Image (cartoon, rainbow, N blue to C red):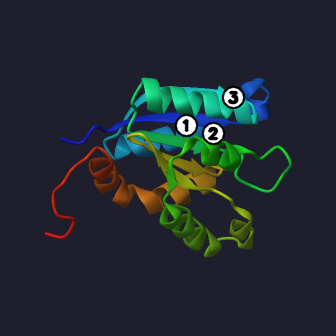
Amino acid sequence: MIDKRVAILVVSDKASRGEREDKGGNIAGELLQKYGFNIVEKRIVPDEKEKIIEVLKEWSDISNIPLIITTGGTGVSPRDVTPQATKEVIEFEIPGIGEAMRARSLEITPHAMLSRAIAGIRKKSLIINLPGSPPGVKDNLLVVIPALEHAILKISGDQSECVQ
């Protein structure tokens, strides 16, 4: 049986100060629930590398949450540090996830090539960076959802053949 618990980390200075509603994190939660995932944690932090690292480690090392989604902080602004924080936390990257999200997003906007979103594994947690914009969250999440259950199964130690 697949553990479909998920945590959502919203990285946004304005949302963390209550100056802007968190629409991206809410869309991620709604979409993941639609596909049978159970949102067990949601937190909003400012664009501060150490705070992001702290939460990612807590959720992967202590709470053992199999899927961790971040929204925001993946662009090229000086405060966009989510990929750097994620790289410090993960044990290895899964480049195909970021590549697939950017490829799909490039069909919609040329700005997608500025995304630095990454994905990787820490312990038995899959961590995926999504952009902060609500349309970007939806488009990128829809790209990866078909692979999530298989990824979680394999990360958890499943030894069955990938091709049936």
- What is the x, y in percent for residue 127? 50, 45
- Residue in the picture at 50% in, 47% down: 91
Name the residue tied to disc 3: 51
157 vs 9, nearest the viewer:
157
Secondary structure found at label 2: helix
Q: Is residue 1 left or right of residue 143?
A: left
- Is 47 above or below relative to 109? above
* Residue 23 shows in this picture: yes
Q: Are marks 1 and 2 in contact (CB under 8 Å)?
A: yes
Mark 2 — residue?
Answer: 23
Circle 3: residue type: Lys
Q: Are marks 3 and 1 in contact (CB under 8 Å)?
A: no
Judging depth in this view, the residue of 69 and 151 nearest the camera is 151
Residue 148, how many percent across, how many down? Answer: 36, 53
Q: Nearer the viewer, mark 3 or mark 2?
A: 3
Q: CA distance from mark 3 to mark 1?
A: 20 Å
Give the image quarter of residue 3: top left
Is the C terminus in the top left, top right, bottom left or bottom right quadrant?
Answer: bottom left
Locate residue 62, reporting x and y percent. Answer: 44, 23
Q: Which residue is mark 1?
A: 26
Q: Does 139 sit above or below residue 17?
A: below
Q: Quadrant of the N terminus?
A: top left
